[in-house]
Image (cartoon, helix red, strand yellow):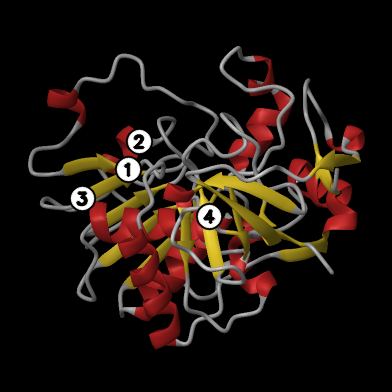
Amino acid sequence: MKMMRAIVLDKITTAKDIVLSEYPIPEVRPGWVLVKVKAFGLNHSEKLLRLNEIRADYIRKPVIPGIECVGEVADPSDSGLEAGQKIIALMGGMGRSFNGSYSEYALLPARIVFPINSNLPWEALGAVPETYFTAWGSLFECLHLSAEDTLLIRGATCALGYASIQIAKAIGCRVIATTHRSEKLTLIPEADEAMLDDGKLSGKLHGVSKALDLIGPRNLKDTLTAVEKGGIVCQTGLLGGVYVLNGFDPIKDIPNGVYLTGFFSNYPSQQIVDDIFAFLNEKKLTPASGKVFDFSQIRDAVAAQDEGKVNGKIVVKISE
């Protein structure tokens, strides 16, 4: 039985408890693809899994976490892909319903494995899958963003915020980015305006036609009143730590002529993946990331995530 290195969870696991284990390389079966993982990003949902959600009955345990990866096809099975093909994979139950990407190999359903055309290095590609898919869907599918828009990004000093700024500026938008920490204002230089967010933006902004709210229900009512009539608000993130909006009254809390939507990133498609990489290639963009760790440093990477030490996407690269 061939073995690989992996992070395997079966209980609440803080950064200090992260250990690289020897684990069997999965056996390929029909409908699934064996991927040689080259890099993966760390995500907030994996932190939630490690520190709380792992206790839930619906989590397959023990489980290898990780909701995204980039790599090469090791064995395509009956997928139609080719061995050695460069791919990204994301969502669809990764790291919860079945083992995810914190490992040297991952056996993944063919429906969430997408071939890509890119010459970017693995550590740059590792910043793309979940973050850029979510940014792309939020900005274009939900907000219908165009060059004429003024975009408010609330909670911009996170991986998704940085990616959204990069994409919006690449198409010519004016971007107003907020953070609740004054020391982080200098970390959003690509935005046209960086603002300190005290939780109340209503009445302080003018001309905002689209808003991407990454804080979530905690400030959503205020965001709805910070855009102009005819504006659209997309609530995508949950950085505020409030997950539902109790007592929300759509008639009273959504201003007349303002539109509210949200993006759920669980349904990637080849067409969207193709569109993202065509955009990155055309605009000659290097995906935004905060820091790259080697897989042997995974404990340090997770500690940096838990302690908020890295501004932007944390990427883990698996060396040969």
Residue 278, by quadrant, is: bottom left
Q: CA distance from mark 3 to mark 2?
A: 12 Å
- Residue located beneath label 4 in the image: 89
Quadrant containing the C terminus is bottom right
What mark, if any, has residue 223 been given in the picture? Answer: 1
Which callout, 4 or 1, points at the residue further toward the start of the chain?
A: 4
Decide: marks 4, 2 in contact (CB < 8 A)?
no
Q: Position of residue 219 (x, y in %)?
A: 40, 35
Q: Secondary structure at mark 3?
A: strand
Task: Please state which amino acid type lies under the numbered disc 2.
Answer: Leu
Which callout, 3 or 4, points at the residue further toward the start of the chain?
A: 4
Which callout, 1 or 3, points at the residue further toward the start of the chain?
A: 1
- Residue located beneath label 2 in the image: 220
Left or right of 147 on screen, residue 179: right
Decide: marks 1, 2 in contact (CB < 8 A)?
yes
- Residue located beneath label 3 in the image: 232
Q: Does residue 214 lie above or below 59 as drawn?
A: below
Q: Secondary structure at mark 4?
A: strand
Front residue of 9 and 35: 35
Decide: marks 3, 4 in contact (CB < 8 A)?
no
Quadrant containing the N terminus is top right
Decide: marks 3, 2 in contact (CB < 8 A)?
no
Whether residue 118 is visible, yes or no, is yes
Front residue of 108 and 148: 108
Task: Please state which amino acid type lies under the numbered disc 3.
Answer: Ile
Q: How many marks?
A: 4
| Crowd band around label 4 with a 10 angstrom C-alpha radius: few (<14), some (14–19), many (20+) | many
Q: State the residue at coordinates (85%, 37%).
A: 15
Q: State the residue at coordinates (62%, 71%).
A: 84
